[in-house]
Image (cartoon, helix red, strand yellow):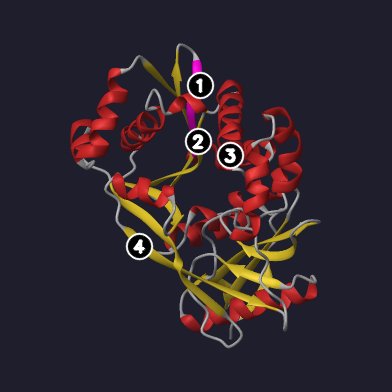
Amino acid sequence: MIATRLADLDSPAERAAIHAYVMAHDQGSAFHRPAWLMGVERGCRQTARYLIAERDGAIVGLLPMTEVHSPLFGRALASAGFAVGGGPIADDQVIVDALAEAGWTWAERLSCPSLELRGGALPSGSGWHVEGGIYAGFARSLTADDEAELLAIPRKQRAEVRKALGFPLEVRIGASEIDRAQHYAVYAESVRNLGTPVFPRSLFDAVLDAFGADADILTVLHEGVPLASVLSLYHKGVVLPYWGGGTHDARRWRANDMMYYALMNHARGQGMTAFDFGRSKFGTGAFAFKKNWGFEPVPLAYAIRTADGQEPRQINPTSPKYRLQVSLWQKLPLSIANRIGPWIARGLG
């Protein structure tokens, strides 16, 4: 008999049991860890709700959910909030479907017109819309040493990395206040230039604190000035550079190229064996950039369920719906974008 219930995330024993299941499951990702949901809750004030499936008192499945609410974008349950992963993981498909149905029950109870599953196993029950062919994931194994890592990069991109290595650039890694402040300044400028609002710094701080040694920041500087910076997660032998960006001057100094190459080498030193470049939308510059690094795209599929007659909420900044808003946001002074952006972005989820 399978039973589902909400986890008590205030219980260290409950969190430890969930963490253990995530680490043991093939599809268990960094976004399934209680640390992720709790970091998001603290950093963006979006409620964490974690579903557990049990059989005879033992965990047999999990579904992390964030209750996202925004005055601009409406309400949704997202699995997992502010993540590109999550979704149900379980011992078998029957349990996956039970978790998905229980998640939808909670969506209705919380007046959320949609439940977004961003990874994990796809539910097989009726009522779910599966979207494919929009996003691809990029990951590959790390090599044996720094030189082999360089040679694994295709020739044209390798030339850019070699240029970066010839510049007087400094690489710093840590999670201190200066690391966090410089990362946020670089990231905020980067996303403003892309035309999207920046997340609150409290989100980055909360995730770093929740993950502890399994997260850090790598920053590339020139003469003490930060040019590129990335906040990465480390999970089951894989490094995931998740929130990264560069300033206007980063391109001149090839700082982004230095950043990712340095991260590959740093991650290997941390015992990582693979590099997960994350997901990108087909046809975008980010998609082409990752292919140039020699990563092969793997199509991703996501499931979403909406209340009868409801359209899924649209929060993707590349949507034609937001073309004007993106253009206007790119023109905002950085000080104004950084003041307004976090209020908007904490509701994107």
Residue 191 badge: 3
Q: Residues within 10 Å of mark 2 (few under 14, many from 20)?
A: many
Q: Residue at x 37, y 36 (%)?
A: 260
Give the labeled residue for mark 1.
226
**Is residue 229 located in the magenta-colored stretch of the structure?**
yes
Q: Secondary structure at mark 3?
A: helix
Q: Residue at x 69, y 47 (%)?
A: 345
Residue 245 badge: 2
**Is residue 180 located in the magenta-colored stretch of the structure?**
no
Q: Nearer the viewer, residue 316 or 299?
A: 316
Residue 306 located left or right of residue 284: right
Q: Residues within 10 Å of mark 1 (few under 14, many from 20)?
A: many
Q: Residue at x 76, y 49 (%)?
A: 45
Q: Amino acid at mark 3?
A: Val
Magenta stretch, residue numbers: 225-231
Q: Amino acid at mark 2?
A: Gly
